[in-house]
Amino acid sequence: MIKKKTNIFLLLIGIIFLSSLLLSYQLDKKSLWADELFSLIAGKKAINSYSELANFVKKDVHPPLYFYLLGKWMKLTGINDFSMRLFSVFSAILMLILLYLLTAKILSERIALLSVMLTSLSPFFILYARMARYYSFVGMLFLLNCYLFFQLLENEGKTIYTIFYIISSAALVSSFYPAISVVAAQNLYFFFLRQNKKTLKNWLLIQVILFLLIVLFCYPAINQLNRFKKDIPADISESFIGILTSSLDLFYEFSAGGTTFPWKIEGIFLFLINSTLFISGILLLKKEKKRILNFLIIHFLMPYLITLFLFSFITKGHSFIFFASRCFYIFPIYTIIISCRLDKSKKFAFAFILILILAFNSFSIRNYFIDKSFL
């Protein structure tokens, strides 16, 4: 048993180390793109003062927490492209560790290890987790929040989980407004899907405190809503075709990343195999571990639907190709479900499919590093 745990730990360290190399490789080779430049300006404002940052982000659509912490990081490590992106890389590494802890807690160490492997060596993860944007930071907070929520349900009355759950929830929404959907999902799970029905009073108190914190930290959102009135709908947003296209692109990018064209063999294969594993993983969990499926699906589906609504009808000035990046934080749920199905495969099928996925992933990741990606 001790030897097995040691082997799992060494494999985990090896996978995270390999992913760290990929995430940090040529980190400052490409110039900052438009949104990263916004992060740079916001970070500089945060270095000066929080009030200056708050006034600046009122003109944008994002809450201030990520930019505030980025500014503090830049003050310590320097104001340059590498330093900014390194903050995202650091968040991504923490994200992988939290993914392992969450999956090991709700499923098994083997599935946790497989989830970390599929996530960390995914072209989608490599593409977005190293950008000087909030993606990996929000992903890290999301997994921390899910872990604490599960611990809170399992360990009633433990103050430490309650305190950190409230803090992580407030931090999550204060970094990405659509993440309020995570709090909504957890309330749905608590009231309709949980097994223990004894903690209603404590939960309601937690929600009142959380509501007050979110209102306090997200006050700038009131002024930011006015920005969308002037938005001109992009491409096919606000239409059924637009909603369908955004959803298809989400699952394509989750499967193959935005680093290979959909008509390329690696893109087609990765989309088909990962989508098949995802659907069959849901059916497997429904049959064997329905409680865990409810936990995973509600944390995937609610953020996906609410973000899709906001993206299609509120922030309608964005093209559908940017939708997947806004859902980056729920990507680990996708890989957990895939890992559950893959784990149940026979030895030969398991090895064959895993090798094929990693091989085609390597083609897509290579496209990114040699500037052949379409995003």
Image (spheres, rainbow, N blue to C red):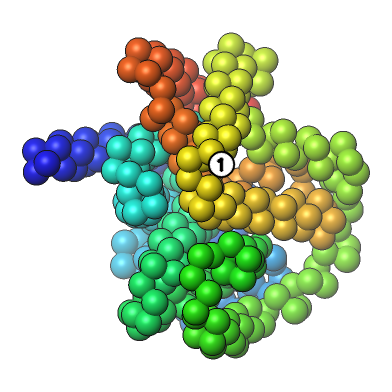
Quarter holding the C terminus is top right
Asked if residue 259 can be seen in this view, the reply is no
Residue 95 against residue 241 in the figure, above or below: below
Q: Is residue 110 left or right of residue 256?
A: left
Residue 227 against residue 222 in the figure, above or below: above
Quarter holding the N terminus is top left
Q: Which residue is mark 1?
A: 286
Q: Residue at x 70, y 75 (%)?
A: 221
Q: Residue at x 51, y 53 (%)?
A: 291
Q: Residue at x 90, y 44 (%)?
A: 239
| Residue 128 drawn at (x, y percent) | 51, 43
Residue 250 against residue 164 in the figure, above or below: above
In-front residue for pair 72/214:
214
| Residue 56 drawn at (x, y percent) | 63, 74
User: SS for tag 1?
Assistant: helix
Asked if residue 152 can be seen in this view, the reply is yes
| Residue 374 drawn at (x, y percent) | 63, 27
Residue 266 against residue 323 in the figure, above or below: above
Q: Residue at x 62, y 17 (%)?
A: 268
In-front residue for pair 367/279:
279
Q: Quadrant of residue 8?
A: top left
**Amino acid found under the numbered disc labelled 1:** Lys
